[in-house]
Amino acid sequence: MNGMAAIEAVLRDWIGLDVSTVGPAAIERAVRERMQATGIRDLAAFADRVRIDTSQRDLLVEEVVVAESWFFRDRQVFDFVADFAVTRAMLPGRPPVRILCAPAAAGEEPYSVAMALLDAGLTPDRFVIDAVDVSRRALARAAAGRYSANAFRNADLRFRDRFFTADREHSVLTARVRDSVRFEWANVLDPGFTLSRGPYDVIFCRNLLIYLTDDARRLVERHIERLLLPEGLLLLGAAEPPIMKGDWIPAGTASVFALRRGVHAPPAPVRARELPSRKEPPRKPIDPSAGTRLAADGAAGAKPAAAAAELEAVLSEAGRLANAGRFAEAIEACERSRSQLAPAPELFFLMGMLHQSSGDLDRAEGCFHKTLYLDGDHEEALLALALVARRRGDAAMAEKYRQSAARAVARKERAP
C-alpha cells in the first residue's frame, strides 16, 4: 500500500471518511500541510507516523473535517424542534428534554437549538443539550462562543441582538446560552460512543452521513437507534434521509428533513372505550355522521378476540407500508378497514400520524380528534394536536392541549 492509500485507510477506519466525497486533492493538501508542520518529507514515513501516533492522526483529521456552519442554518428546522420540545417538556414529572448534536462543529448548531428553546419559553432547567465533535479545534471555538460575521448569514438577525454582545468585529454569546450546551470530544464511530449517553428526545446528525462510507453510515445509524427515544426526532441534512436503511418515516414537512421511528402494531389487543363525558380538550368540529357512528360503536364494549386480531393485522400492514415510505397505500389500507372493523383509537391515531407524515395537517388533526372521541386520555393524540396547533401559530390552543395531556398522564398514574 503506497503512502497516500495508507493515509486514506487511516481516515476511513478512524472517522469513516469516504475520500471521494471531499476529493483526493483535499486530502493531499491536508497531508502536505501536516508534513510541513512535522518536518517529515517522505510520504511513506509520514503515513507510518500517522498510523502509530494518534496525536498526529488527530491533527490530520483537523485539516480534513468540514466544520462549515452558521447560526440557524435552515431556520424552519429549529422552529420545528422548538415546537416539539415545548409540547414534551410541559408534561408533569417529565425529565428535561434531552438533545444531542453530533457533530457540533464550532457550536453554531447546538447554540441555535438553545436559543430556539429559550425563545420558545423553556427555561434552561427544562432541557439538556449535548454536543460532540471529533475536532478539538472546533470545540475550542465553540467553548469560546466568539464568532465573526461569517456565522451570521440569515436575513433575520434579531436573535443576535438578544443573545450576543458586540466586541469589535466579533459577536460574543451570552453566558446564558453558552451554559445551556455541554461540549465533549467524541468520535461517533467509536464502538463505545453510546455508553453512558442518552436516551435523547432529539438527535441532530446533519450533514455527516454524506461524507461517510457505507459501513460507517450503518454504524452511525445503529448508534442513533440505540440513543433515540421511541417517540424521538432525528434531524438530518437535506440529502441524508434516503441514506437511512432502518424503519424511519418523515416526522414533519419536507423542508425540515426530520425522521421518527417507523410505525409498529401494538403488542396486545386493546378495548374501545366509551365516549368521554367531559368537554375538554377543545376540539374542532368534525363530520357529524362520523361522530355519531363513533359514539354508537365506541360504547359497544370489548371487541371479540377475532376482531382484535384483525385490527392488529391491519395496523401491522399499514405500519409496514409506512415504514417503506408508501404513505398513500398505508392510508388506503386503514380507510378500507374502517368499514369492516369497530372504531378503534389505535387506527385513527395511526391514520393521523400517516397524514401528518404526508404533510396533510387538516386530515391529521381530524384523525387525532376522532382518536380522542374513543379514548379521551390518549396523551399522544393530545400532544400531536398541541404540535399541530403550534405549527398553525395558535399558542393558546397548544397550551390547552398540553394541559389536557398532562391531566391524562396524571389520571393514568393514579389508576390502580
Image: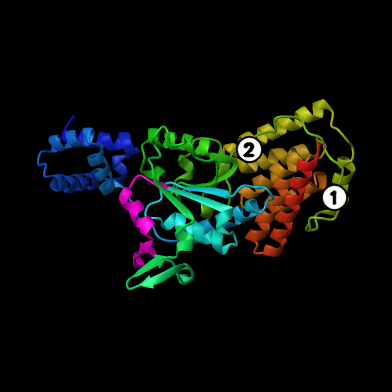
Q: Residue 67 in the image: state x and y as whole percent.
A: 34, 52
| Residue at the spot of label 1 | 291
Extreme residue toward the left, this view: 41
Q: Residue 218 in the image: state x and y as whole percent.
A: 44, 34
Name the N-terminal-most of marks 2 and 1. Answer: 2
Q: For mark 2, give the secondary structure.
A: loop
Q: Count the labels in the image.
A: 2
Residue 179 part of the magenta segment: no
Q: Please state which of residues 134 and 381 is positioned toward the viewer in this rendering.
A: 134
Label annotation for residue 272 = none
For mark 2, does the 10 Å Cα neighbourhood hold few (<14), some (14 to 19), or many (20 or more) residues?
many
> In percent of the image, x 68 and y 33: which residue is there?
265
Q: Which residues are magenta?
A: 132-153
Q: Please state which of residues 195 and 110 is positioned toward the viewer in this rendering.
A: 195
Q: Residue 12 in the image: state x and y as whole percent.
A: 30, 36
| Residue at the spot of label 2 | 263
Amino acid on which the number 2 mark rests in the picture: Val
